[in-house]
Amino acid sequence: MEKIKNPILSGFNPDPCIIRVQDTFYIVNSTFEWFPGVRLHSSKDLIHWRQLESPLKNKTQLDINGVPASCGVWAPDLSFYDNRFWLVYSVVRNKNKSFTDLTNYLITASNIEGPWSKPIKLNGVGFDASLFHDSDGKKYLVQQTNDYREHRIPFNGITITEFDVKTMRLLPQTARKLFDGTDVKMIEGPHLYKIDGLYYLFAAQGGTTYTHQEIVARSKTLRSGSFEIEPKGPFLTNYDTPDFEIQKQGHGSLVKSTNDKWYYASLSARPWHHDYESSYGPRGWSTLGRETSLQQVVWDDKGWPRIVGGHAGQLEIEAPENIESAKELKNTDFIVSDEFSKNTLNKDWSTLRIPFDHHMGSVGNGKLKLIGQNSLTSTFDVSLVARRWEHFNFDATVGVNYSPETYQQMAGLFNLYNNMHWTGIVISWDEIKGKVIDVVNFNEKYCSRLGKDLIDIPNKSEKVFFRTRIRKSVYTYEYSFDGQYWNATGVEFDAAELSDEYIQKNYSGGFFTGAFVGLGSIDCSGNEKEAQFTSFEYREVLV
């Protein structure tokens, strides 16, 4: 029987919420500053997953232009009750050491692919909000609680608030603290379930790093202070298993298959190390970001959930039996190509903070056209179309047709973590050489890695081909004038600099996304110079 292999969603797919509706499983994930908002996948067997249209696809549903890096859409929660889907999500506008400014929203739909209702504002008490549908018909919002006061714990327990279905509004007067967590602190990501007459609260603790863990508490009532902690916990963690391939497991949700097998979907990461580094300190660099893994759950004789194989989890787990496998979705040789033939972007692509529309460019007839806007350091109006790094080793290639007229214009192929950490191979302009190729990076400041050795582009070459080669710990850029013969630029980058761990080490505050490869057009002159891209390919490389 085919096994479920972790991670089930590779690359940047954090904070999973999983549900089952009849014979189909659905997972939603955080997207932070990337657009469209909320990543959505479906599966029939928990092995093969198909990406669906994201619920938040336009600015009337989601306006995050200008939000800082790693703000935006946090921890969506999906549920299905009363014959419709309910989606709760946080939109974080600002985060610093004291305040986390956010609004929680709710949208609903009778079909998973929409149309979705207009967003309903819930509250801003705290992020990671989830909607609990009780067996008596009542509904509650369960969430992390922000506390910005000095000498207080910033994560001030789990708050529960009743939700009135008639008015589709919360009842703030019913809000109360449900659970404090343990001395591990930083309790977040709550999901509440009622199983065999008991309320089970699953929540994350320890921060979404290598100390991350998931705990379980239960109670006969929803009375404050009535929850007891699972003995012999935590339920799921890797803080004490530094040699295990999967790390950071925690924040997630519970689901039961049609044949009564239980599973827990959680965020996770797969760090790697440079050859000269200890595998324990630092524990590693997670360039693929926080991914989604799945663990099998059994219930002990005291009614507590336990991870099969121990609290560290397993790389492979048993799939539900007697479930038809959607093998047509399996992609043995992972190759994604886009000839830009359709007039809409493929679902693989994301943009930064704003939707892809005529202000950014157009797509169709074999071309992606991007109008030059702000630099990639900006949090407003950036022309970048990108996809997640899903493998440690891959090649990405594209053709570029571009005629800059000033050094303030550039377009090409980029790798980036956020607006403060990115690199690229670009076509630009030099006062002496004219149209040239350069390799650039931004890490606190802008730098041309070729300096005076900018590469001349022959006059006869209307199109230039770019390729980036990612090889786990390092990556490089190459160029070609015919798409066949490739030239090295001689510049090598440390892939660790595009990881959560590197950014968090060098900057205060949390960063939670992952590496992307993308196509971008920059015009700091404000003249909106257009770049044309053709024949993009992303190909996994087995090494």
Image (cartoon, rainbow, N blue to C red):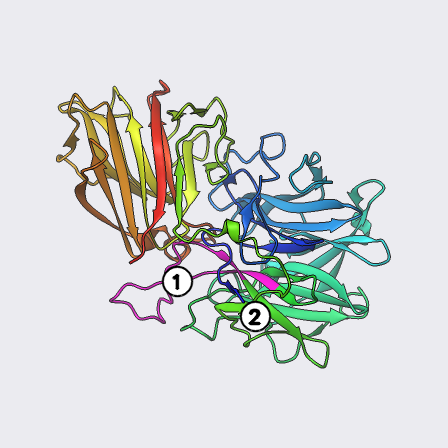
The quadrant of the image that shows the N terminus is bottom right
In the figure, residue 177 lies in which quadrant?
bottom right
**Which contiguous range is marked in magenta?**
264-293
In the figure, residue 112 lies in which quadrant?
top right
Measured as percent of width and height from the top left, residue 478 is found at 22, 41
Measured as percent of width and height from the top left, residue 11 is found at 45, 52
Q: Which mark is residue 14?
A: none
Identify the residue at image location x=81%, y=57%. Answer: 134
**Residue 388 located left or right of residue 222:** left
In space, the residues marked 1 and 2 are separated at their CA atoms by 18 Å
Is 370 magenta? The answer is no
**Residue 315 located left or right of residue 411:** right
Depth check, front residue: 225 or 541? 541
Q: Amino acid at mark 1?
A: Pro
Q: Which residue is mark 2?
A: 236
Measured as percent of width and height from the top left, residue 99 is found at 57, 49
**Residue 310 located left or right of residue 338:** right
Residue 410 seen from this side: no
Q: Which residue is mark 1?
A: 271
- Where disc 2 sits, the SS reads strand
**Residue 236 located left or right of residue 387:** right
Neighbour tally class for label 1: few under 14, some 14-19, many 20 plus, Cα within 10 Å: many
Measured as percent of width and height from the top left, residue 78 is found at 67, 50
